[in-house]
Every structure is written in C-alpha cells, then in structure tokens.
Amino acid sequence: MADNNNTYSFIPWLRRGLSRQINPAEVDTFASIIDEGPTLKRASLRVKTTFDLTPIAKDGQTAQNDIRTETINISLVGPGDVSGLQPISILQVVPANGVKNFESNYFPFIEFFEEDIPWRYTPAKEAGDRLRPWLTLLVCKNDEFFVTSNNDGLSHLSLKITDDDNFLKIFPKPKNIWKSAHVQFSNKKLEKDDNLITTTNRLLNENEDIAFSRLLSMRKLEDNTAYTAFLIPSFETGRLSGLSLPFNEIPAQRAAWAESFDLQKTSRIQPFDFPIYHHWEFETSTADFITLARKLMPIAAETMPAALRVDVQNMGNGLSYSTLSERPKRNVIDVEVATKPINFESEAFPNRADEQIVADVMKNLLSKNPTLLENMGQIGLLSTHAGTQKMQKQTKNFVISRVIASLKNPTRKSTEELEELKLRRNKDLKNLNVRSVMSRTRNSEDTSEMDDPWIVPPLYGAKHIMATSLEIEDNIDHSWFPELNLDVRHRSAAGLGKKVVQNNQEEFVHRAWEQVELINELNQRLREYLLNLQLNSSLYQTRFNSKYLKDLMIYLQPMKYAPIGEDGGTLNDEIVRRGIPSAYASSAFQSISSSKSTPEVTTASLSKAIVDNRAYKMKDHLIKDLLDKEQIEEIFTYYQTSLEYKELIKYEELWKSV
C-alpha cells in the first residue's frame, strides 16, 4: 500500500524460532468443536537426532562404531505457561488510557514492539495465511463486568452475561480471531511468494525496528459509551492457568470461549472468568468526521429559510431612517444563516446608491471609536507624519459628520448658518480645509458635541489586529476588518454574540475567576519552589564558614548526611574535609554543649564529659576521631569568645524544634 510516498506492507502472522517447526499434524483447527487438535496442553515438535556410538573395545577385540537415529517429541511453551505480559513489551494502545472522545466507528487496538508476540505461544501450526493469535483484545461496557483477584493476587475478569445476544456482542467468533492481528512493515514492499517467511525474517534480523505487530478488538462500539479494554488469552489452557485451575487434560487448541452463550456455560469451568494481561479505559464520542459527513442528506431548498429577514429601519446610533436626510428604499435585508441553499448569496447592506448615506454615517461614527486612537498610540503612529495625516483625516470625518448632523437639526442654528452648511454639503467634502472648519465649529454657539466624549458602536476585531482606521488601504493584510464592521449583515451576527456575552456575563465572570484561582494556586506553588531554590542557593553560597558549620553540626545533626550543593556532597563530607572530628556533631556532644553550665566548663571537664557519655563508641565515628587537647581548647575558646553565646541560647529551642 502506498500513502504519501511511504510504503506499508501487512502480513497476517509471523513466527520466529522453534515455533515455526511445530508438527504439521497440529495445524490450526480454528476452534472446531469436532476437531480440537491431536495434542493436550501444549503444542509439540519432532526432534530427530543421530548418535555416533563407539563401544569400548575389550582386550583382543576391535570396536565397531554404532550409528543410531532417535526421534522424540518436545513440548513447547504455550498459553498455559504464561501468567502475564510485561508492560515494556507494549508499544502503544489506541485509544490511549482515559480518552473521552474516541470515534465510535474505529476499532481499539494494541501494538507490540516485537513482531511475533501475538502468535508466539499459539499451540498450533499455521494453516496457510491463517493462524489464530494466542491473545485477544476484549472490549466491555463498564456495566458488563467486574474485576476480582484470586488467591495468587492476580486480577481476573468476571463477565456479567445473561443471554446469547450480549455474549455475541462481547465475544468474536473463535474461528475468526485470526483476522484481528497482523504485522506492519514500514517502507518495505513485500511480495506474497514462497520466500515471504524467509524474506521477513531476514529483514528483521537486519533491522528489528522495521516492523511491529498489532492486535485489534472486533467489537462494534456505540456512541458516547464508556468501555474498558482487556487483553486476555485466546485458548482455554491460558484461561484456566490464569485462574489457577488444572488444564492437563485440556486440548491445546481449545478456544477460551465457545460459539454461543449456552455452550460456554455448559462446557467451561468458571465460564465467564478470564485472566487479565493488560487493560485500559476509554469513552467514545460519535463517529469520525468522514463518516458523519457521509450521513448528511440534502433537503429541498424550499423547506429551509435561505436567510433571516432583518429590519434595518431603527438601528439607533444615528443610523435610524428617521434621523437621515434621505431615506433608503430597503427596509428589510437578508442575513445569511449557517446552512444556506447552494449558490445563494445575500446582498450587502449598505450597498445601493440610495444607501450611501447609511454607509457614510456608519463609517464616520465608527471612525470616532477610541480604540483606533489607542492603537495608534500603542504602535507609535501619533508622533509620525503618517500618524498625523491619519488623525487629520479622522478629524475631518468627524467634522463632516457634525456638518451633516447640523443639517438634520436646523432649530439649533440661525438661518444664515443653515444656508452656509447646505452650501458646504453640496461641495466636495473631501476637499474641505479641516482646520478652517474646526475653527468655525469652535466659534459656534454650541460646542458641546465637540467637547463631550462619544459613545459609539464597537469595532469588532480592532484591538486584535491593532487597527488604526477603517480604510481599505490601511487593512490590506486584514481585508475582512472593514467588511465585518461596515456591513450590517456581519455586524448583526457579531451583535448577537455580544448579546450572548451580556446575557451570560455573570456565569462567564464566575468561570474566569475559577481559572484565576487555579492560576493563583499554581503561582503560589511556583513562588514556594523558587523560595526553596533561593534558600538552598544562599545556604550553599555561604560555603559553610567555620561558625556556620559548627552551628549546623550542633543544632541540625539530622542533616549530617543530607546532600548539599551542586556536587551532591553532604554536611558530613564537609566536616571530614575540614578535619573536624565527627564526635563534635554527635548527640552526646550536643547534650554537653547545649547545657547551661557550658560557659563554665574547662578543658578537663569537657574531656571527661566526652568520655562519660561514650562519644567515642558512637557507630558513626572511630576512636581516632576523639578530640585532642588542641581541638578541645579551640572549641572552648570558640564558645567563650567568638560565639555570641547569649544570643545562641535564645534560639536554641527554636533550632531544636526545626
């Protein structure tokens, strides 16, 4: 098979070693009730050996060699001799343990590193292209079984089966399990001929990683169901052995389960109990995408709406028809739904000539959104020439909108001002001098509209792409941005999403805080971990000066063998390196040195106390480690002069508690 220039080859079985020489008479019978094979318990092979015997010659006689040939049957290890499977032999399981959304139209499977594992202990010889594996992957719903342990501590599966229908859902036909296993070769094209077995073994001898074996479950899964997969023996000898039951008189090829519920119940001991070699859990969802897509059925266009009919006469924000100087003809527009008839396209709004006034007002209104200026400031455009031109353009649009608004409310202006504004509107507004218009506007009686902040509709996506305008030339890389915001069809859909957020804001905020709590907990753990690292680093960087080392020896004796520093050395190693007697860090010496009478001790009394407390008999130091006179005098001087003894006493209890 070829896929993406990779070649894969599959073979139905593979055997290596002596199992390839099983007696031809013991060919696989595929769980036939009439013929369960000629041997009991295990498969066998015939071994023919030739002996060259040379008798010991008697005096005066000539010895004559005797050549003899002996043929014997040797039993091979079979399923009854296997009590478990090492997890290290498993390459992977699919779905992985704990998966919650495995496609229900797929087969679960298990893969092994070694190519011959599924057939290694099969007690039969292959029948052409077919050979039953000695392992079977059984998949059960969680209410179809329970797991118990036998006297040897081995887990076994007990199935809760009450009728034949349930039995046939769980168990595949014994004669068909040869279909459940195969070997996959990667980047090798194998030909089916008489040399196939020789070729495969040669390839595996050259590179063991070229292939692996796979065992599939043959059960049809259901949607949204919890399952557990069990790796069990396929043959009755393996089942009985795993349950600690005798199997000496059992035919080697007898299947671990029968063709039907009634036959299984009457012909097997503990018929619904099976040893478990491996198991894992998973849950199904629905089928994979391709299968679900194929289930889609076309329906007549007249049975479903082509679009939603949306009234645009009262959009508010200065866009309502009642506030416009010219009323567009379209009152209702089509907003496309998620599923629409083929070749159906709704008309944009605004789009027609009489709707241009809606487009102008909408664009001018949205251009005053503060997000655009914020984005310009963040990306540093405000201080550049291009940024200044862009601000002037947006300011011009702002002034133009105010001119148009003035025309709609003539009661607020004098007759002369109204006539002047009408003349301006009839000119090419794009050529207006922005500064002169702003100057005239500032000098007018009503400047509140210029000074007060504007609350405008949102710009969808502006913050995400750091948009600075709605002009097409400024959004070459994000052409969707002007289209999304300037087409009422798209804005209505975005507005519905906004409404959903508003209606559920309490729930969304609650969920957000739950995530924040988890983040705070994680951050706290990180801070504690970093604090530990800092403390360890600080301790190590002190390099254990003499005073600090002595304090540790006296008050933290349990830390004597704790690793310190990056080199993994211990406190005891440091003591030895510095030539300090380990008796100094003993419990006996701690008792002496922490006594309130310590300041009054003398060299003689200190030595006597060491001897009385048998410090030299401590198992962690030898006689040679006892203090000599100079060392005792050094310690005495340290306590009397160098060490701030009074302060040390205050913290003595604290150190001990630590």
Image: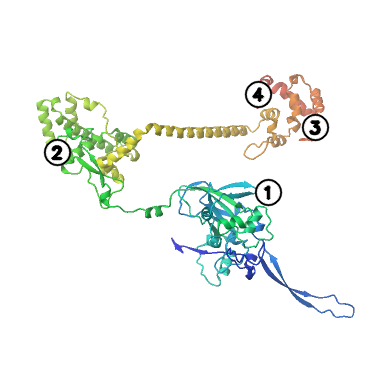
Secondary structure beneath label 1: loop
* First-in-chain label (2 vs 1): 1
In percent of width and height, residue 227 lies at: 52, 48
Read off the residue under disc 1.
152
Q: What residue type is labelled 2?
A: Asp
Read off the residue under disc 3.
616
Counting other residues with Cα less than 10 Å from the Cα at mark 1, is it few (<14), some (14-19), or many (20 or more)? Answer: few
Read off the residue under disc 4.
654
Q: In which quarter of the image is residue 135?
A: bottom right
Read off the residue under disc 2.
428
At a point 65% along the width and 69% down the height, the residue shown is 23
Q: Which of marks 4 and 2 is in front?
A: 4
Name the one closer to the observer, 109 or 597: 109
CA gap, disc 3 to disc 1? Answer: 51 Å
Q: Nearer the viewer, mark 2 or mark 1?
A: 1
Q: What residue type is labelled 3?
A: Tyr
Q: Are marks 4 and 1 in contact (CB under 8 Å)?
A: no
CA gap, disc 4 to disc 2? Answer: 87 Å
Counting other residues with Cα less than 10 Å from the Cα at mark 3, is it few (<14), some (14-19), or many (20 or more)? Answer: many
* First-in-chain label (4 vs 1): 1
In percent of width and height, residue 242 lies at: 65, 53
